[in-house]
Image: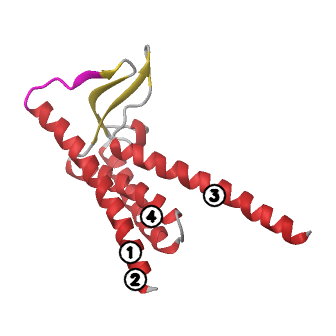
Amino acid sequence: MLDIKLKNYLSQLFIIIFIFATDRASKYYLINLYETGTDIDFYIFSFMNIYLAWNTGVGFGLFSTDANVFYHLLTILVVIINLILIFLMFKLVGIRRYFIAMILGGSLGNLFDRIYYFAVPDFIDLHIGNFHWFIFNIADIFITIGIACLIFVELFSKNINKDKNETNIQ
């Protein structure tokens, strides 16, 4: 039993470290390109380009502001959310823990940037013609996937439990 729990914790830690490291490596590479004078605005596909933007808000640039107090309050809120995620990761069972680990890995990557740079470097720009989606980064991708998977599991598990209860009643 202890071996299984330890393996689960280690695999969740691996997910967190992998996502954090992947996010940091991508940001480090682009920031180094920028600091050497390279223009960070190039197309990968006709619908996606790399454009370095500094985000002082939360995910996808929401609530961006220059106000110092608001920025620090957001950072404190992100720290509190990360602590809640750590608690949930130990409290939840099954696959939900791995989705929390994905969210936590991305969130820690962005938190590092908020503390170190006082902004989060975003660089993936998806667009169709002149319509551009929010610019985001690798951490945002994993946060979004983790949240979407948690929502899916919650919706799907409710239907399974409902089906089981209905078959038990008959």
Q: Mark 2 points at which residue?
A: 3
Q: Which of marks 4 and 3 is in front?
A: 3
Say if 164 sits above or below 68 in the image.
Answer: below
Q: Mark 3 points at which residue?
A: 154
Nearer-N-terminus badge (1/4): 1
- How far apart, in angstroms, are the residues tagged by discs 4 and 2? 23 Å
- Would residue 119 be found to the left or right of residue 162 on screen? left
Q: Tell me which segment is drawn in magenta.
A: 36-43
Q: Which residue is found at the position 55% from the left and 55% from the top?
A: 150
Task: Count residues near mark 2 (Cα–Cα under 10 Å), then give few for <14, some for 14-19, many for 20+.
Answer: few
- Look at the numbered disc 1 and give the secondary structure of its residue: helix
Nearer-N-terminus badge (1/3): 1
Nearer-N-terminus badge (4/2): 2
The amino acid type of the residue labelled 3 equals Glu
**Residue 19 shows in the view:** yes
* Image-quadrant location for residue 8: bottom left
Q: How many labels does the image show?
A: 4
- Would residue 124 be found to the left or right of residue 34 on screen? right
Residue 12 % position (x, y): 39, 66
Residue 26 % position (x, y): 24, 42
Nearer-N-terminus badge (4/3): 4
**Residue 41: in magenta span:** yes
Q: Which of marks 4 and 2 is in front?
A: 2
- How far apart, in angstroms, are the residues tagged by discs 1 and 2? 6 Å
The amino acid type of the residue labelled 4 equals Leu
Q: Name the residue under label 4.
A: 85
- How far apart, in angstroms, are the residues tagged by discs 1 and 3? 24 Å
Task: Count residues near mark 3 (Cα–Cα under 10 Å), then give few for <14, some for 14-19, many for 20+.
Answer: few
- Look at the numbered disc 3 and give the secondary structure of its residue: helix
Q: Residue 7 carries which label?
A: 1
Q: Is the magenta stretch mostly helix, strand or loop?
A: loop
- In the displayed orientation, state which residue is furthest to the left: 36
